Each structure stands twice: as C-alpha cells, then as structure tokens.
Image: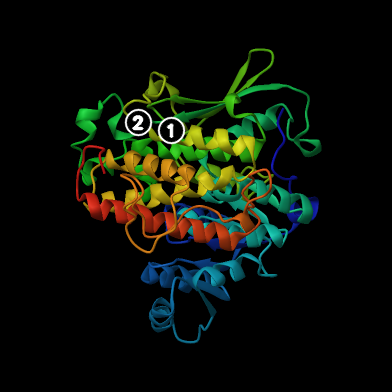
Amino acid sequence: MIRYISRMPDRAWEDATPRTVALLGSTGSIGTSALKVIEAHPGLFQVAALAGARNVRLLAEQAARHRPAHLGVLDETGAKELRALLPAGYAPEIHVGPEGYAALAVLPDASTVLSAQVGAAGLRATVAAARAGKVICLANKESLVLAGALIRQICAETGAVVLPVDSEHNAVFQALRVHDTLQDGGRAPHAVRRVILTASGGPFRGRDRAFLSTVTREQALNHPNWSMGAKITIDSATLMNKGLEVIEAYHLYGVAPESIEVVVHPQSIVHSLVEYADGSQIAHLGTPDMRIAIAYCMAWPHCVDTGVAPLDLVRVGSLTFEAPDLSSFPCLALARRVLAREARSPGGAGLPVVLNAANEVAVDLFLHGRIGFMDIPALIERALDAHEAGTPDTNGPDTSGPDTSSPATAEPDAASTGTDGTFLMHDIDHIEALDAATRRRVRHWADAAGTQGTGNA
C-alpha cells in the first residue's frame, strides 16, 4: 500500500502566479538547474530568496540577476564578502548559518521552498519549511533519511506538501500518478507491489574490490551520465546514493522495505519503475537532466518546456539491467541494515543519523586524499557497529577494547530514547548532536589509521 508522506498542493497554490520560490542551495548543481527553469518561465516563477553557502561570488551573480529581498550564506565572513559584491542600490537582507536558512524556509513571501542543500545541513531548513506549511520541492534526501517520520508527522499537522526532486523518486511519483494511487492521502487499495529504483552503477560498475582499493579521486568523480556535485558523485560511485534513496523511498511512499528494489541500469534512461499487483510495470524514461524533475515539481501541475533535448530511443539503442554487486559496493547493504532498524522503530535508534554522518565525513576524507575508496564503507560500518554496541562516552581515545576509541559518544541518552527504544526524532538538536559526535568519531579513526585505501581504516 502506498501512503504518501503528504497531501498534494491545493488549488490556491496551483493558481497563484508568479509562484514565489525560496531556493536553498542555489549555487549547487540542483540550484543552478532550477534557476534555468525559473528563467525560462518568468511569468510562472519569482525568486523570493537565494542561499548559497560558500560560493559567494556565484550567489552574488544570481542575486544581481534576480534581485530577491533575502539571501543566505554560511557565515559572517561570507555575508561581508557578499555585501561587497552586490550592485549599488541593491541591499537585500542577508541571513547567516543554519538559523538563517531556516528563516528563509519560512518567509511569508515564499509559497514554495526548493530544499537543495547538500547533506545533513539541509535538515533544519526542511523541517522549518514543513512546520510553516510550505510546498517543499525536496532535493535534499538526507532530510528524510535523518527525520522522515518526523517530517511525515509535521506534514499531517500543518498541511505542508513534499514533492520529490530526486530523479528516481520523481520518476516513481510520476508512475504512481498514472494509477492515481496518490489520491485521498495515498491510501489506495493494494495496487502497488514494488517500487524499483534504478542506479547507473557509477564509473566502477563491474569492478572488483581489488581494483576499487586503488581508485583515485579523479576516477571516482568521472560519472558516466550525470553532471553533479562532488559529494553526490562519490555517493553514486559507492552506491551509497542509492542506499540513501532506498531509505528516502520508505519515508516518501510508506512502502515496506522489502517492497523497494534496486536494479543497476547503466544507461540512466529509465529513472525508476513501479510494479502493480497485476504484474505490470510503469517506468519513467527521459534524458538524464535534472531540469525535468525540478520543473515537474516547481511547476506542478503544469507540464512546461525544460529546454532538455527529447529522448531519442533509436540513438540510445539498448537498455540493460542487472543486480547490484553488494560485495564490491557494500554501502547499499549498510543502508538496508539501517532501514530494517528504522522499520522496527521510528528513528532507527539513531542509526540513520550515524549512517549519513559517517558517510559524509568518509567522502570528505576521500576527496581530500586522506583515505582510500574502500575505506568509505569500512568507516561507515565501523560507526554503525560502534553505535549499536553503545561505545562509552570519552573525551579521548578509549582503550577498553580494540574498537572503542572515540573522542565523543554517538549513543542517545536515556532522555532521548523512548521506553521501547525508539529514538525520539522530534528533537532536532539531539539529531545534530549525534551527527556531530559521529563525525568526530570517524575523523578520529581515520587520523589513527592513516591513509589505507584497502578498506581497513
């Protein structure tokens, strides 16, 4: 049964033009693609706010072009640099840090929030937008990985709407619309049998662990089909991106974990499929360009020209599918392990937070040449094991055992855990504290191990 995370947009939002958008993450790959869609349809969209974290120069160029009344940056240094770059006579309010992003997400002037920040940094703003009852075009999958149950609850209370921008989940969303399974709150009869997410396989499809232990940063960033930011490109190479999307699908569509399947599809033409009880499968096909998914959400329910070249199936030639290799790419299995815990108790005893934090740190370490490619899943698994084992709180290395060295605990305390072991995910501060503790822990392990590259960090 499909139980979608939110209601659909109401008629007032659909009819209002121009549609006012707060674009969080405007300087990233999703943000720049979204601005192309907005600029192609000036009568349909108006930019109410832009936020760009560290890329202040590009943010200044975007702001000068769209002149929103609100901008957001990571810190005061960036705010000072941004003010100096803005044209004379244009003095928007500049919001700073996570609190600033959250303020942009609740602006009365913005009916729509595009949540396109990278990683756990997007959680606070996504939750703020949901609490404010906004229509959220969600590209930040980590928000649902970290707090999917909470966001579902908030949407039920405030009437907020979530529209999925991830290409795979947007494909599923469109395939579900064909059978109107999202009507009446998504409580359709048991028409859906499986949600099938496709994965490109990244640049190392078919390679074994021995080869993967030798790959370089440059090789891993060379995605065969998609043009994306560095972090998501590495996640695609490890298949962690697909693991996070499996968790995201669970929260978006309310389906059982065993009803979510992943298949490797190297051509990236079929973006995902839905299988129905009668044995039929409905697939979404298209040129691999994020403007399609972005426009589908931002322009809902209208179908608008995205500027993307039409798909030429004759030129594509053939479409192939295969099972993922969980031995060479264990990140997908690690995400499945976390989802199994999440399905037993909302919040998964904090494991989703640990999974995501450990991955973000490990990817960053790899990008900076401090660990090898196969150290990424090794560090993530070690963090999950340590969290489940309840590693004691320390201020430095713990010498009580071979696998307990940690500068800080990542285990929720009694006040944050229900009597049934449920991790109370309504406490955003606690989620962020667990996230920070896990990051310290993984960096400590990497520092202690040195650069390995073999999966032994």
Q: Position of residue 235 (x, y in %)?
A: 38, 42
Q: Are marks 2 and 1 in contact (CB under 8 Å)?
A: yes
Q: Position of residue 297 (x, y in %)?
A: 61, 47
Residue drawn at 37 percent across, 59 percent down = 440
Residue at the spot of label 2: 329
Q: Is residue 315 visible?
A: yes
Q: Position of residue 148 (x, y in %)?
A: 62, 46
Q: Secondary structure at mark 2?
A: loop
Q: Depth check: give the residue in front, 86 or 2.
A: 2
Is residue 266 placed above or below 185 in the rendered structure? Answer: above
User: How many numbered marks appear?
Assistant: 2
Q: Position of residue 179 (x, y in %)?
A: 72, 26
User: Which amino acid, by three-letter code, is at mark 2?
Assistant: Phe
Spatial separation of the CA atoms under disc 2 and disc 1: 7 Å
Residue at the spot of label 1: 332
Q: Is residue 216 left or right of residue 298?
A: left
